[in-house]
Image (cartoon, rainbow, N blue to C red):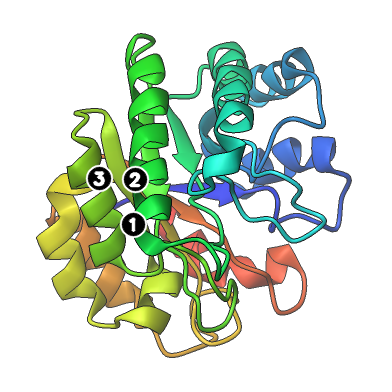
Amino acid sequence: MPRFAANLSLLFTEQPFLERFAAAAGAGFQGVEFLFPYDWPAATLAEKLTQHNLTQVLFNLPPGDWPAGERGIACLPDRVEEFREGVFQALEYAQALNCQRINCLAGIRPASLPFDVAFQTLVENLRFAADLLAAQGITLTVEAINSKVDMPGFFLDTSAMAMAAIEAAGRDNLRLQFDLYHMQIMEGDLCRSLSRLCPHIGHIQFADKPGRHEPGSGEIHFDTVFAHIDALDYQGWVSAEYRPQQDTETSLDWFRPRIS
């Protein structure tokens, strides 16, 4: 059975953020992730992880101005210094939280920015981040996010685009973050893609399509997909990153049989 983690940015939102660690542990999760840790002291988050015997499995590099609509800055040539400062900040949190994976959001490419300039900027930033994290035994992931529904204009919107950046960067600790929801929207044929890309995948996330809700709410046959991931001998975490249709506890019907 895959190792399931809960994304605390989307799940257990019925409670204040710092109370979600207890809720996740109480529901049977052993790992957690969230979008960003930077609004809380690292020591506070580390205490919550230790208190509830949870593993921090992943978080994202600083994304720029998220409330203003920025979704990463790694492809933006005028933000390279800010990107590098963010890598150092993320590394401090990763060390405090004993987190072994950090995800890089490529960002939205402005129409005025040539594709090749954005791509080369991203590749150089991935190299910088991967090299810094490698010295601490940390894996860097990069994610393809759908540009049809959730993030129009996102630079890496297919697994092929993400793999092109990974291959161009050429770093052993740089891996693909494969999100089932985003790739179902952009590509479909999830099991075939997972088989092909598994050697390059460092982290998996999921939600059903459409709606980005819990398994069983849409078109993805999760029993098949989870069994396929298990058959691939994938060793990483599989994180629930969905928005519950009602409340989180009700949405966990897919999970309870897997821990009973």
Tell whether 205 sits left or right of 25: left
Which amino acid type is shown beneath numbered disc 3?
Ile
Q: Which amino acid type is marked by label 2?
A: Gln
Which residue is more in the foreground, 235 or 92? Answer: 92
Quadrant of the rendered image containing residue 48 = top right
Q: Nearer the viewer, mark 1 or mark 3?
A: 1
240 above or below 203?
Answer: below
Circles 1, 3 touching at the beta carbon (< 8 Å):
no
Q: Is residue 253 visible?
A: yes
Circle 3/circle 2 CB separation < 8 Å: no
User: Which quarter of the figure is the C terminus placed in?
Assistant: bottom left
**Residue 63 placement (x, y as % from top left):** 64, 44
Mark in front: 3 vs 2: 2
Evaluate if marks 2 and 1 touch, with contact meaning CB atoms under 8 Å apart.
yes
At 28% across and 49% down in the image, what residue appears?
Answer: 165
Q: Nearer the viewer, residue 89 or 217?
A: 89
Cα distance in 3D space between marks 3 and 2: 12 Å
Q: Quadrant of residue 220?
A: bottom left
Name which of mark 3 and mark 2 comes first in the sequence. 2
Tell me how far mark 2 sits from mark 1, CA to CA.
6 Å
**Tag shown at residue 25:** none
Q: Which mark is residue 116?
A: 1
Q: Residue 166 bears which disc, if any? A: 3
* Image point (50%, 88%), residue name: 218
Number of other residues with Cα within 10 Å of mark 1, as a class: few under 14, some 14 to 19, many 20 or more: few
- Residue 123 is situated, as x and y percent measured from the top left of the image, at 33, 41
Residue 54, by quadrant, is top right
Along the horizontal axis of the image, is 24 left or right of 146? Answer: right
What residue is at 57 percent from the left and 82 percent from the top? 149
Disc 2 target residue: 120
Amino acid at the residue labelled 1: Asp
Q: Residue at x 59, y 27 (%)?
A: 81
